[in-house]
Amino acid sequence: MFNIKNTDFSWTLFLDRDGVINFEQHNDYVKNWADFKFYKESLLALPILAKKFKTIVITTNQKGVGKKLMSEVDLTNIHQNMVLEINKVGGRIDHIFYCTDLDNESINRKPQPGMAFQAKEKFPSIDFTKSIMVGNRTSDMEFGRNAGLHTVFLATTHPETAFPNHLIDYRFNHLLEFAEALQY
């Protein structure tokens, strides 16, 4: 297992969105900005993470668009507002990769590694061996493993997930706890 204390500014942080940065909608989707509610811990964590990682990207499955429950314009509006609020507190998101595909076997739909490859194409300096995927579902952890990333599980929505677990390198309660662990 890697030691998170060995991370430095050359590393890349991959973040899931719902359940990591913001509350998930129970049995539904965040369909517009009014539905989007930040975890207070994430807004405290993101400025710390901005100082720790060279590149920070979000990789998020957004099946709600594929199901036509929302439009890509709605999704863009959510992301623009989210990034604006993150920037206001001193955080940073360098890019958001999302997959609207309904087919679970799509290369771009987590747990498949397509969004990691998209990130590497956009940011050629990304080294997957010096990258961490932070998510709240085992599919995020599988995505991380499939792309050769280290993994951090947040127990925000699925605290029953077993740990230790071969898919999970570290487990924290929320994003701020992870960010604080990088500082000490």
Image (cartoon, rainbow, N blue to C red):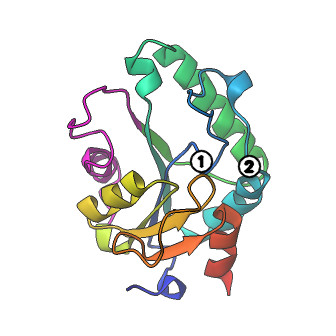
Which residue is at 73% across, 37% downward? 37
Looking at the image, residue 108 lies above or below residue 2: above
Residue 138, position as x, y percentages in the image: 41, 57
Graded by Cα atoms within 10 Å as few (under 14), some (14 to 19) or many (20 or more), the crowding at tag 2 reads many
How much space separates mark 1 and mark 2, taking CA atoms? 8 Å
Instruction: Determine the main secondary structure of the stretch shown in magenta.
Output: loop
* In-image side of 90 versus 149 (left or right): right
Vertical order, 60 against 12 (above or below): above
What kind of residue is marked 1?
Gly
Quick check: 88 left or right of 113?
Answer: right
Q: Is residue 77 magenta?
A: no
- Dot label at residue 51: none
Q: Residue at x 57, y 48 (%)?
A: 93
Count of numbered circles on the image: 2
Q: Which residue is mark 1?
A: 19
Q: Quadrant of residue 107?
A: top left
The image quarter in which residue 179 lies: bottom right
The residue wearing badge 2 is: 39
Work out which quarter of the rendered image holds the N terminus and state it.
bottom left
Residue 86 pos. (x, y %): 70, 46
The span shown in magenta is 98-127
In the image, what residue type sits under mark 2? Tyr
Task: Give how far across and how far down residue 131 sits, in percent.
Answer: 39, 68
